[in-house]
């Protein structure tokens, strides 16, 4: 089973994904702030599957991803970005960053299958 981290400022999304992952037998931690999630990851040796929202007040999802990619200890993790905005409407720089770093993108509203497929594909 996977270790999953969900970063989203929306408590309903965090709670829904927590129930889903727990029902599937995964271990999950959730955070509303990118800075808290980064601090947690600094102390983790075991690879995690990390779902992060794009639009958040304190730290946008792309900033979280860039900061995480700069720290060598976080490179073992599998990152997924999700957002209500379609990928076609995202800044070109972000799309390039996602492609360059092989970070999957999920458009909200997402399905349970989309989420679970990403966990299965991560092979943590």
Image: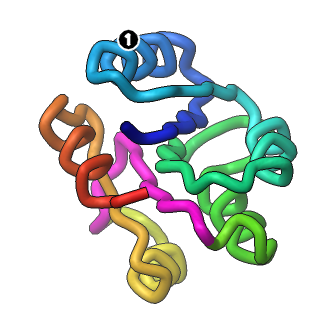
What secondary structure is found at the residue carrying circle 1? helix
Taking the image as shown, residue 61 lies to the left or right of residue 13, namely: right
- Image colouring: rainbow
Dot 1 crowding, Cα within 10 Å, few <14, some 14–19, many 20+? few
Decide: is 30 above or below 120: above
**Residue 58, percent from left and from top:** 79, 39
Taking the image as shown, residue 69 lies to the left or right of residue 13, namely: right
Decide: is 88 above or below 2: below
Taking the magenta stretch, the answer to whether it contains residue 84 is: yes
Residue closest to the eye, 24 or 66: 24
What residue is drawn where x is 26% and y is 40%? Answer: 115
Decide: is 55 above or below 87: above
Residue closest to the eye, 65 or 24: 24
**Residue 124, percent from left and from top:** 43, 57
**Residue 112, percent from left and from top:** 18, 29
What residue is drawn where x is 56% and y is 13%? Answer: 11
Question: Which residues lie in the magenta part?
Answer: 76-88
Q: Quadrant of the N terminus?
A: top left
Give the total of numbered labels: 1
Taking the magenta stretch, the answer to whether it contains residue 47 is: no
What residue is drawn where x is 48% and y is 61%? Answer: 78
**Residue bearing mark 1:** 19
**Residue 73, percent from left and from top:** 77, 68
Residue closest to the eye, 38 or 44: 44
What residue is drawn where x is 46% and y is 88%? Answer: 100
Taking the image as shown, residue 81 lies to the left or right of residue 93, namely: left
């Amino acid at each position: 089973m996977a270790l999953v981290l969900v970063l989203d400022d929306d408590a309903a999304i965090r709670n829904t994904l927590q129930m889903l992952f727990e029902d599937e037998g995964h271990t999950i931690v959730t955070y509303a702030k990118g800075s808290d999630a980064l601090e947690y990851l600094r102390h983790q040796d075991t690879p995690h599957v990390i779902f992060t929202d794009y639009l958040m007040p304190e730290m946008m999802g792309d900033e979280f991803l860039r900061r995480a990619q700069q720290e060598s200890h976080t490179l073992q993790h599998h990152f997924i970005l999700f957002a209500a905005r379609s990928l076609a409407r995202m800044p070109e720089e972000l799309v390039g960053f996602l492609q360059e770093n092989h970070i999957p993108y999920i458009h909200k509203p997402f399905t349970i299958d989309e989420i679970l497929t990403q966990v299965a594909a991560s092979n943590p």
